[in-house]
Image (cartoon, rainbow, N blue to C red):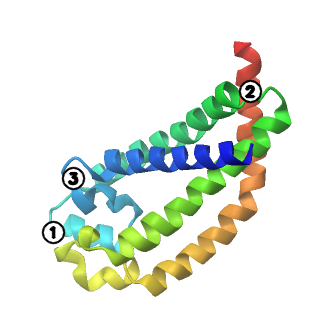
Amino acid sequence: MLVKMIVEIVIMWACFVLFMWILVGRGRGPVGGIQYAPEQVQKRVTECGLITQEHIRKQRICASVLLILMDIIVPFMMIYLINGGRSWWAFVWQWCVLIMGQELFDWFAVDIYWVCYTDWWNIPEARDLEYLWRDPKTMKKKCRKKYIMVYMSLPVLALIIGSLCYGISLLIR
C-alpha cells in the first residue's frame, strides 16, 4: 500500500503540473498566475495595463474551482477505483495523505524553486516588488506559515472532503 500511495502522490504532482500549465501556460506567462501574487504586485500589473482587476478576479475564481475539483475528483478516483476504498476511514486518511503530498510539491517545487529560483516569473514592470513574492527568504517564511496553517487544518478538511467522497461512493455503488 505504501508504494501505491507514493505512486498516487506522484500522479497528484502530475495533475498539479497540469493545473499550473492550464493556469500560466499556453503563452500566458507569469501574469496568468498573478492572482497568487501580493496585492501590491497585482496593482502594479494592472496599472501597467498587462491585465485588469476583473480578469484577475475571473482567474482567481477559475483557478479555485479547477483546483477544488481536481482535489476532490482525482483522489476520489484513486481511493475508490484503484485502492478499492469502501469505508469512511479509507476515504478520510487516503485523501489526507494524497493532499499532503500535493501540498509538499506545491511548496517546494512551485513556490520555492519555480517562483524564487527561476526567471520564468519575472515581470519586468514589477521587478522592484520582487522582494514581496520572489525572494527565497520571504517565500520560505510564507511557506512555513502556510505549512503550519494547512497542516493544522488538513485533518479537519480530510474529515469533510473524505466524508463527502464516501457519501458519493455510497450513491454510485
Q: Which mark is residue 148?
A: none
The kind of residue on which mark 1 rests is Cys
Percent from the top left, x then y, of residue 33? 33, 58
Q: Nearer the viewer, residue 64 or 82?
A: 82
Q: CA distance from mark 3 to mark 2?
A: 39 Å
Q: Which residue is mark 1?
A: 48
* Upstream in sequence: badge 3 or badge 2: 3
Quadrant in the picture for the N terminus = top right
Q: Which mark is residue 84?
A: 2
Percent from the top left, x then y, of residue 117? 35, 77
Percent from the top left, x then y, of residue 57? 36, 51
Q: Residues within 10 Å of mark 2 (few under 14, many from 20)?
A: few
Front disc: 3 or 2: 2
Q: In the figure, residue 38 lies in which quadrant?
A: bottom left
Give the residue drawn at x 73%, y 48%: 2
Front disc: 2 or 1: 2
Q: Nearer the viewer, residue 169 or 149?
A: 169
Q: In the figure, residue 119 lies in which quadrant?
A: bottom left
Q: Residues within 10 Å of mark 3 (few under 14, many from 20)?
A: few
Give the residue drawn at x 70%, y 43%: 95
The kind of residue on which mark 2 rests is Gly
The kind of residue on which mark 3 rests is Arg
Q: CA distance from mark 1 to mark 3?
A: 16 Å
Q: Contact, CB < 8 Å: mark 3 with mark 2?
A: no
Q: Which residue is mark 3?
A: 28
Q: Contact, CB < 8 Å: mark 2 with mark 1?
A: no
Secondary structure found at label 3: loop
Q: Is residue 117 above or below residue 101?
A: below
Secondary structure found at label 1: loop
Give the residue drawn at x 59%, y 45%: 7
Give the residue drawn at x 49%, y 44%: 67
- Relative to 93, is 30 on the left or the right? left
